[in-house]
Amino acid sequence: MPSAINSKAEPVTGNTGLELLQPYLHDSSVSELSTILKNSNGSSFPRLHIHGLVGSSVAMVSAAVFLEYPAVHMAVLPDKESAVYFCNDLENLFGESSFSFHKKRVLLFPTSYRRPYEVEQTDNSNVLMRTEVLKRVSSRSGNTFIVTYPEALSEKVVSKQYLEKSTMKLKRGEAVDLDFIYDLLDQHGFERVDFVVEPGQVALRGGIIDVFSYTNDYPYRLEFSGDIVESIRSFNPSTSFHWTGSTILRLCLMFRTGSCTKKGSPSLNSFQKVLCSGWQILH
């Protein structure tokens, strides 16, 4: 399902995936399909039916079209298992298996809950993936391939406006009350723990707050001197290794579907509505 937003794709170099895609990139059928999508300009995408593809050739044709026509593409697979396999095929073809989450062009859009339709039991890692997709869509960032399945699409999402309002920005050297941040994270459903290991957790020790946001690959450690943010550093929760410090941190206080019964909860929209708001999507 590609959209009509034009953006330039980054070339895939130095991996065997590109070599495997070469026959498809030079195939007349793939070129014809890409040309049809480019010429539509988002006004009225034609209904296209592609047959004769088996196994990973579906992913290869999809990857070739994505490179020929860089935009926002979305593939809807029958179920979660097939979506994960398809996403893995694309990552290998693009050489992105070892990339950090925010640098990947291929993103999986899963359900946020652990078990089908048990919305109270959310999976924080899935919430992280859903949040990243929503960020890309809300910011209209082109050159992204979204892979999903019907169950994930049926789960409603927050609006772009709520996502923006739920992002807190902290700066090094800024004066802010430590207890205020801790209480705010607690109000937005962050779990209080001794050590953070997954998205949606926060830990407080003296003048230090460790928080794992829904939009970061790793947790961040905020060190305070009184009410002044003295340092902001990301770290690996497995090894406690700290990376270079940052001057600004954006924390997404992401709303989770499972808490939609709470007073003051925002209204939810279907993911299709979020996509179609200013976007032209091929169904």
Image: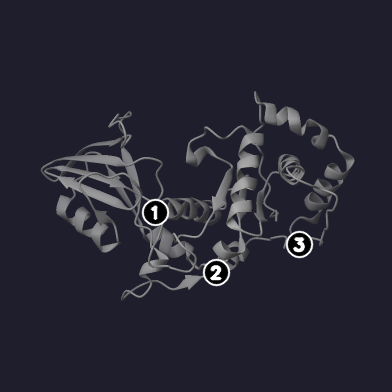
Work out how far the residue at label 1 is from the one at label 2, CA to CA, in angstroms: 20 Å
Q: Earlier in the sequence, mark 1 or mark 2?
A: 1
Q: Nearer the viewer, residue 70 or 104?
A: 104
Asked which quadrant contains residue 216, the reply is top left
Task: Tell me the residue that label 3 is attached to.
Answer: 43
Task: Give the amino acid at mark 2.
Answer: Ser
Q: Earlier in the sequence, mark 3 or mark 1?
A: 3
Q: Earlier in the sequence, mark 3 or mark 2?
A: 3
Q: Is residue 207 left or right of residue 166?
A: left
Judging from the image, the colouring scheme is one colour
- Helix, strand, or loop for circle 2? loop
- Residue at 39% x, 54% y: name it: 124
Task: Tell me the residue that label 1 is attached to.
Answer: 124
Task: Give the amino acid at mark 1.
Answer: Asn
In the rendered image, which quarter contains the N terminus? bottom right
Which mark's residue is nearer the viewer, 3 or 1? 1
Residue 218 has which mark? none
Task: Tell me the residue that label 2 is attached to.
Answer: 270
Instruction: Tell me residue 230's x, y (percent).
Output: 19, 37
Task: Give the amino acid at mark 3.
Answer: Ser
Work out how far the residue at label 3 is from the one at label 1, CA to CA, in angstroms: 38 Å
- Residue at 55% x, 40% y: name it: 104
For the view shown, which residue lies furthest in the right direction? 28
Q: Residue 173: in sight, yes or no?
A: yes
Q: Residue 177: in sight, yes or no?
A: no
Q: Is residue 48 left or right of residue 153?
A: right
Which mark's residue is nearer the viewer, 3 or 2? 2
- Helix, strand, or loop for circle 3? loop
Asked which quadrant contains residue 153, the reply is bottom right
Q: Nearer the viewer, residue 220 or 19?
A: 19
Instruction: Tell me residue 236's x, y (percent).
Output: 33, 34
Asked which quadrant contains residue 55, the reply is top right
